[in-house]
Structures are given as structure tokens and as C-alpha cells.
């Protein structure tokens, strides 16, 4: 068994929990140091970061079915209008076959509201990237080489866009998370600054204190270039932007059981 295979095997034994409010399956990521950024592009300067607290992160992105529960309980707007693309939802409904697909067309503001309702948070950039890169600090969740068979992207989606959140299990990260590369971009908590990595705190960075755009991570079904699917890849959108390729994943800070 190779070292990478060993980590994949261990991922299956990671501590998991279910968030009572929305049913999200979450896996524990321990505290510790990792290298954030991979040096590809000026905004991904590699630097060592320490996360002093462990946290639970969603094994999967939030689904349409979960988001519907949120809407019913809170009266929050449905993602039936988007800033770009074609919405999946019509009114307060989505196609039944999309129940287990990631919700899209949600802004950062929508995503933060969902996280608050679910008694969780959006991940910081550091939390998101550490989970995606796994214990070995890999370039992609599955390894250091691009493999188009291990995530949903423009080259294999056919006439579809997203896939179920449990799709492409061969692309799972070393911590056991699915689709942190491909399927949909995911909003993070931080304000975005292309230069932030060069001056960010070494412990528990939470992004700039203010900004114009919020961070999103992970690549999506719309792109073809492998560089877009690196775990360290980072961009920002205005917090009110609702793209048909943008979703969310939850985090809850706390010790492992």
C-alpha cells in the first residue's frame, strides 16, 4: 500500500458527525500546521499556517434538498434568479433528480444566512484549503497530478452541469471530503485580497478586515483547464453575486469526539 493509498484508507476511519440542524455529514480536521498556497500565480504565495483549533467540515456541499428545508423554516429567498446562467430552481422548486446535487445560484449573503441557520459557519480560506489538500498537502484532493476522471469539470459533464454531491468518490480528499475540486465553486468566509498571503498572520488567518469581494474556492463544472481545480486556487466575487456555478459547504469549529 502506497502512502497515498494509506491516507485514503485512513480517511474512511476519520471521525464523522451529523449536524442536527440540516443533516450535513461532517468530518473532523485536527489542528496543526500546513502550507497554504502553492506558488501558482501571484495570489497563491506559499506560506506556513497554523490552525490552533480543530474543526468539522462538510463531507459534501450543501444540497438542493437541504436548502429547501432552510427556505421552508426561514422564508429566505429561493435561488431561482441568478446573476449569470440559468437557475436550477423555478419558484420554490427544483427538479426532483437534482435533490442531491449542490445548491447553486446562492450569493455569499445567502450562504452566510444558511450557515447561521444551520448553527455552523462558512469555512475560512485556511480551513477550506487544509481540508482539500489533506494530511499530505496535495495539489489536488486526490494527488499531485491532474486526473480528469476524479472530478466533475467541463470535459466530462456532457449535457449536464453538476453531479450529486457524492459523485466522483475516487477524487475524495485525504480527510474524506468530496468534490472540493470540481462540481461547484464554494463560498468561503473571508474577504478576498490577491496580496493577502504575503502579509497574513501565521496563526488562524481570517482574511482582510474589509474588502469588495468574498473568496470562493474549488473549481467547477464550467471550466476545462486543470489549473482551476487546484486546492490552492482562489478568487473573489461580490458578496451579492449569484452564479449558476456557486454553492457552499459548512464548517463547525470544535474538538473531535
Image (cartoon, rainbow, N blue to C red):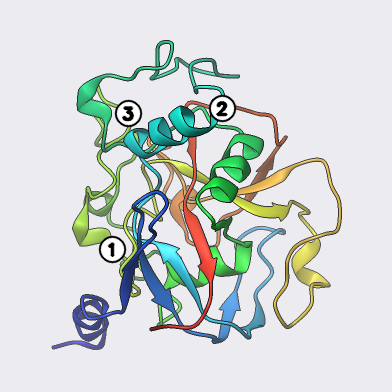
| Residue 235 shown left or right of residue 103 in the figure | right
Q: Earlier in the sequence, mark 3 or mark 1?
A: 3
Residue topped by disc 1: 172
Name the residue rendered at 25%, 54% in the picture. 150
**Residue at the spot x=52%, y=81% of the render?**
54
Q: Where is residue 222 in the image (x, y as percent from the top left)?
A: 42, 32
Going by the image, does 110 lie left or right of 226?
right
What separation in Å lies between label 3 and label 2 (alpha carbons)? 25 Å
The answer for how far apart the CA atoms under marks 3 and 1 are is: 19 Å
Q: Are marks 3 and 1 in contact (CB under 8 Å)?
A: no
Where residue 76 is drawn, which disc sits there? 2
Mark positioned earlier in the residue sequence (1 or 2): 2
Q: In which quarter of the image is the N terminus?
A: bottom left
Secondary structure of the residue carrying tag 2 is: loop
Q: Is mark 1 on a helix, strand or loop?
A: loop
For the point 29% across and 79% down, the residue is: 14
Amino acid at each position: 500500500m502506497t502512502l497515498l493509498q494509506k491516507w485514503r484508507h485512513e480517511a474512511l476511519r476519520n471521525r464523522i458527525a451529523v449536524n442536527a440542524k440540516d443533516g450535513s455529514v461532517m468530518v473532523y480536521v485536527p489542528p496543526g500546521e500546513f502550507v497554504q498556497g502553492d506558488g501558482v500565480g501571484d495570489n497563491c504565495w506559499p506560506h506556513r499556517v497554523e490552525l490552533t483549533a480543530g474543526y468539522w467540515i462538510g463531507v459534501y456541499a450543501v444540497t438542493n434538498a437541504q436548502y429547501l428545508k432552510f427556505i421552508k423554516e426561514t422564508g429566505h429567498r429561493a435561488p431561482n434568479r441568478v446573476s449569470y446562467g440559468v437557475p436550477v430552481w423555478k419558484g420554490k422548486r427544483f427538479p426532483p433528480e437534482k435533490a442531491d446535487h449542490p445548491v447553486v445560484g446562492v450569493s455569499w449573503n445567502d450562504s452566510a444566512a444558511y450557515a447561521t441557520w444551520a448553527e455552523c459557519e462558512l469555512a475560512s480560506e485556511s480551513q477550506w484549503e487544509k481540508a482539500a489538500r489533506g494530511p499530505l498537502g496535495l495539489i489536488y484532493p486526490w494527488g499531485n497530478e491532474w486526473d480528469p476522471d476524479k472530478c466533475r469539470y467541463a470535459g466530462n459533464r456532457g449535457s449536464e452541469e453538476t453531479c450529486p454531491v457524492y459523485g466522483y468518490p475516487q477524487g475524495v480528499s485525504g480527510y474524506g471530503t468530496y468534490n472540493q475540486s470540481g462540481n461547484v465553486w464554494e463560498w468561503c468566509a473571508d474577504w478576498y485580497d490577491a496580496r493577502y498571503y504575503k502579509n497574513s498572520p501565521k496563526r488562524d488567518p481570517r482574511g482582510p478586515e474589509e474588502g469588495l469581494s468574498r473568496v470562493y474556492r474549488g473549481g467547477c463544472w464550467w471550466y476545462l483547464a486543470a489549473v482551476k481545480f487546484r486546492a490552492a486556487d482562489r478568487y473573489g466575487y461580490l458578496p451579492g453575486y449569484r452564479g449558476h456555478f456557486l454553492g457552499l459547504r459548512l464548517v463547525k469549529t470544535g474538538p473531535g469526539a
